[in-house]
Image: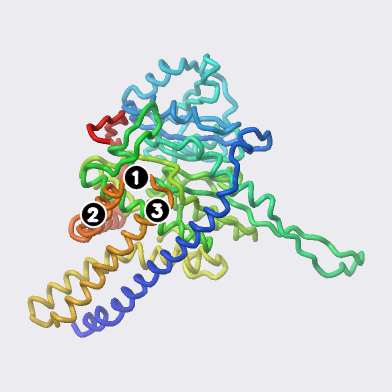
Amino acid sequence: MELIRNFYEGFVFIYGCTMLFMYALLALLSLRGIRKFQRKNSYVDYTKMLQSPLAPGISIIAPAFNEAVTIIQNVRSLLTLNYPTFEVIIVNDGSTDDTLQKLIDEFELVEMDFAYNARINCKPVKRLFKSTNTAYDKLVVVDKINGKSKADASNAGINAAVYNYFLCTDVDCIIEKDTLMRMIKPFMDEEHHKIKEIGEPCPECGYVHVKEDSIRVIATGATLRIANSCEIDEGVITRVRPPEKWLPRFQEMEYLRAYVLGKMGWSVINCVPNVSGGLGLFDKEIAIKAGGYDSKSFAEDMDIVTRMCTYMMDNNMKYAIRYIPTTQCWTEGPPNMKVFSRQRTRWGRGLAEIITIHRKVIFNPRYKQLGMVVLPYNLFFEFLAPIIEFTGIIYYIYLIITNQINWQFALILLAFVYFYSVMITTLAILWDHMTYQYYRTWREVLGLALMAFIEPFVYHPLIVFFALRGYFNFLTGKKHTWGNMQRQGFGKKKPANT
């Protein structure tokens, strides 16, 4: 018992202080990154990219499994993005509803011969469809055998992709019209900023050889938000509102904290841990050489980024993962506890898999930021956090029962941690609003910010519980599949008061 006491009074105290310091550091880095992005973006004319024949082609890949409720509206939204050269690849992953038939009927699809090159392993593709209507000539539909994971469907989409870059998204997402232009820009910027290094004269020929030392952008990400309760017309967000129901509202708050404050902060030091599966633009060549998505992984978004980074460093190539703080994607959050629990349990299991699969990279200086910052942070402050918190609560209860607790000190410490967490969340919400003003009124902003005061008692315990259940399922080998998310569908909401 003395060992446990020393652990929680010593190590856990240092652990908690380090976590608080990391959050503060990320907040400062995020603010710096947002200001830098705004300065650079203030003089960018994206209309020139629309007219440029040099804009790289992009393949949009959207896996679909039983998405009949939203599939038509969201495909139409993807087809109307503002970009000169792109294609939309919908991968029907063995849907058991009428997802495929709706696509065939709505977009006048016919089966066709297609140069499908299976460079990445996935379940067999049965058919490929194109439209007979030239208005939909950018659309390709891949019909494949169900691979029981989004990763397997995404691999099929990559195999069918024509262009050198692919954007992976979900069919339940609504993407802003300028998303492709904004997300390809970091790739194009780096191509124009190659640094030339002058070496010593060659001992054989006597001339100085010029070597180009460039950083290759391998992925970019952007902020995602919850679309629940927003006004949507023909696949376009016309009025942004915080979700009305509590569960999606908590998720909106969590997303803003994770993207605007978290990932934007990591981007400043090139330590982005993952690019969201809901919206991520990737270098197809590097993704294929890294093996594509792992079809058995439950955290395919983090896994592919980790393996792409590992590949780059194994081949002595400099890389960067960029992040855009603007909201470019809107997704339908899980509407009920059943769907939410399944999602978060899968995320917890996926994190356990990542730590296990890539354990040789952790604390390996050969892999620089990935081995010394990204994965160690995920190990200590993402993976271990629910375990330490749960066992800490048990130990706290034991101290209360045995009357060994210093109430004055304990209450002060709890109050500090509580208000610190509220402050971090509030900063993320306020920075987002003051910078981009997605919400129309301050009342909506404050209504969302007030959720931070009850999050530690209502929402956070659920996150911890589902994460632990995901760890347990991983240890016991319990089967888990890519199930139907039970979409409610996006509609145009017309409230009485706007």
Q: Which mark is residue 434?
A: 3
The amino acid beneath tag 3 is Met
Which circle's residue, 3 or 1, is located before the other in the chain?
3
In the rendered image, the vertical position of residue 347 relative to residue 335, given as above or below? below
Find residue 143 and report its image quarter: top left
Tag shown at residue 451 = 2
Q: Where's residue 402, x and y in %?
A: 8, 80
Residue bearing mark 1: 439
Give the residue type at disc 2: Met
Q: How many marks?
A: 3
Packing grade of label 2 (10 A; few <14, some 14-19, many >=20) is: some
**Separation of residues labelled 2 and 3 (CA atoms):** 18 Å
Give the CA separation, mark 3 to mark 1: 10 Å
> In the image, residue 102 lies at what x, y percent?
37, 20
Residue type, numbered disc 1: Tyr
Along the viewing direction, whichever of 308 and 12 lies nearer the viewer:
12
Q: Is residue 266 left or right of residue 181?
A: left
Seen at 32% across and 66% down, the residue is 384
Q: Depth check: give the residue in front, 208 or 101.
A: 208
Q: Are the residues tagged 3 and 1 within 8 Å (C-beta)?
A: no
Q: Secondary structure at mark 3?
A: helix
For marks 2 and 1, give the CA distance. Answer: 16 Å
* Residue 361, above or below 115: below
In the displayed structure, does residue 397 sit left or right of residue 331? Answer: left
Q: Secondary structure at mark 1?
A: loop
Which label sits in the foreground, 2 or 1? 1
